[in-house]
Image (cartoon, helix red, strand yellow):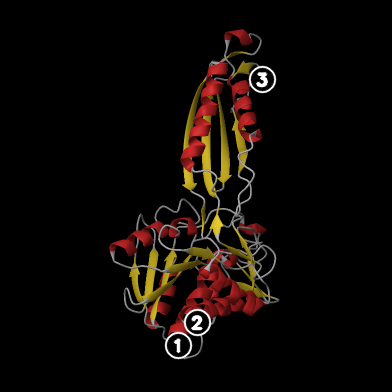
């Protein structure tokens, strides 16, 4: 049987309009391919989300190598801004255009194609697992977590896992992610007393309190970075009163901050810090401050070792580039996998992800499949 063409498989997936939470047949394409290659496939659906689990080899059979990825994509925005059909997988001058070409249908196609060819050509003494979700781009509460829950309930396990997210900032092969910063968002509502702006003494303006709070938070140095992480950051992303009048002191003011934090902190420690800051402002200004927090994931690191070395050697062999081990960027589903087994991330150059005219070099898709195939051969050698 001829090798699986990862470019053709990518095109098939891109033509599925799988904007979260829609699947539009994307995972069924993969299920058919993997089932035909001898993988045992199961659905781990939850909350209306399609999730595919596939294993080649016997359950608990010696070593197990896992891949994780997603087929859902972000919305396309205004379709008139695109120069190619957003779900057309059109190829021009060696470049494929379409939503999900970079993030991350090419990555899924590459590791699925590599896995199928590997088990057909050199059946390993162990298991190959693919855990693919349709819920990564939004809240991710029914995606990879549902797959991991399914695995625990059914006695399935990955010894190590590679997440195929785009990781390279400039050139194919230049970065492997061995961890990620944590992410926390906090919403604040400051409530004072409405009044006439000509008589401020009869009101309690919430705006000075909010401005002082935001200044204290944004000017505070959280840390100076750690061995594997850059300094933590806090960004004020919005301040709003919704007040159209120039002669009215509003009763309320809202603001939101986003914190990206390293392993100096935890969600609990940062929450306590925010609570202390809020208490001080409430006391100083005589206002009431309501705070709501969402912790999207703690920081984590897979220390440099066997797994990162395995991936780095394969990347260098196929690209000639020695990849940097990094923890930069946003969150990914690796934040869930890290509680199951050691995990790293490696994938495409991610410069166009989530953009209009998202695209990928066709040659990079084939190169990525070659890297993943080499990783599998070296792991089971």
Residue 268 appears in the figure: yes
Q: Count residues near mark 1 (Cα–Cα under 10 Å), then give few for <14, some for 14-19, many for 20+.
A: few
Quick check: marks 2 and 1 in contact, CB under 8 Å?
A: yes
Residue 229 percent location from the top left of the image = 60, 52
**Mark 3 Cα within 10 Å, few/some/many (few <14, many 20+)?**
few
Q: Which of marks 2 and 3 is nearer the N terminus?
A: 3
The image shows a total of numbered marks equal to 3
Q: Give above or below for 10 relative to 170.
A: below
Q: Which of 14 and 370 is in front in this view?
A: 370
Name above or below for residue 243 compared with residue 293. Answer: above
Identify the secondary structure beneath mark 1.
loop
Say which residue appears at 57% left-offset and 80% top-offset: 370
Instruction: Kindly indicate the quadrant of the structure image that contains residue 199.
Output: top right
Q: Do the residues labelled 3 and 1 touch (CB within 8 Å)?
A: no
Instruction: Report whether 100 appears left or right of 154.
Output: right
Residue at far left of view: 154
Q: Is mark 2 on a helix, strand or loop?
A: helix
- Answer with left or right where residue 174 lies relative to residue 287: right
Expressed as whole percent of the image width and height from the top left, the position of residue 234 reads 61, 40
Instruction: State the image quarter where residue 353 is shown.
Output: bottom right
Q: Is mark 3 on a helix, strand or loop?
A: loop
- Residue pointed to by mark 1: 122
Q: Name the residue under label 3.
A: 246
Labelled disc at residue 377? 2
């Amino acid at each position: 049987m001829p090798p699986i063409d990862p470019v053709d498989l990518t095109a098939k997936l891109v033509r599925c309009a799988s904007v979260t939470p829609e699947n539009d047949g994307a995972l069924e394409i993969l299920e058919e391919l993997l089932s035909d290659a001898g993988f045992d496939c199961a659905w781990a659906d939850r909350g209306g989300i399609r999730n595919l689990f596939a294993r080649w080899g016997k359950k608990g059979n010696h070593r197990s190598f896992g891949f994780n990825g997603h087929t859902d994509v972000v919305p396309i925005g205004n379709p008139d801004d695109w120069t190619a059909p957003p779900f057309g997988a059109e190829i021009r001058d060696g470049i494929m255009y379409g939503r999900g070409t970079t993030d991350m249908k090419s990555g899924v196609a590459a590791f699925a194609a590599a896995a199928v060819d590997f088990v057909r050509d050199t059946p390993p003494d162990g298991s190959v697992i693919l855990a693919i979700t349709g819920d990564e781009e939004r809240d991710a509460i029914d995606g990879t977590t549902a797959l991991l829950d399914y695995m625990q309930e059914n006695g399935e396990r990955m010894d190590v896992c590679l997440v195929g997210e785009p990781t390279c900032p400039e050139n194919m092969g230049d970065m492997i992610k061995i961890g990620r910063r944590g992410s926390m968002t906090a919403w604040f509502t400051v409530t004072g007393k409405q009044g006439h702006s000509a008589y401020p003494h009869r009101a309690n303006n919430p705006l000075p309190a909010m401005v002082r709070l935001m200044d204290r938070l944004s000017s505070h140095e959280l840390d100076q970075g750690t061995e594997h992480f850059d300094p933590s950051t806090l960004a004020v992303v919005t301040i709003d009163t919704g007040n159209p009048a120039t002669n009215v002191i509003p009763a309320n003011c809202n603001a939101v901050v986003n914190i990206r934090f390293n392993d100096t902190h935890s969600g609990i420690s940062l929450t306590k810090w925010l609570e202390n800051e809020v208490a001080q402002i409430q006391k100083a200004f005589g206002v009431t401050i309501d705070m709501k927090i969402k912790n999207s994931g703690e920081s984590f690191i897979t220390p440099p070792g066997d797994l990162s070395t395995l991936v780095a050697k394969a990347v260098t062999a196929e690209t000639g580039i020695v990849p940097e081990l990094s923890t930069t960027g946003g969150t990914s589903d690796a934040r869930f996998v890290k509680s199951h087994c050691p995990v790293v991330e490696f994938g495409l150059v991610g410069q166009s992800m989530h953009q209009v005219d998202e695209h990928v070099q066709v040659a990079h898709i084939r190169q990525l499949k070659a890297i993943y195939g080499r990783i599998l051969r070296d792991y089971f050698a």
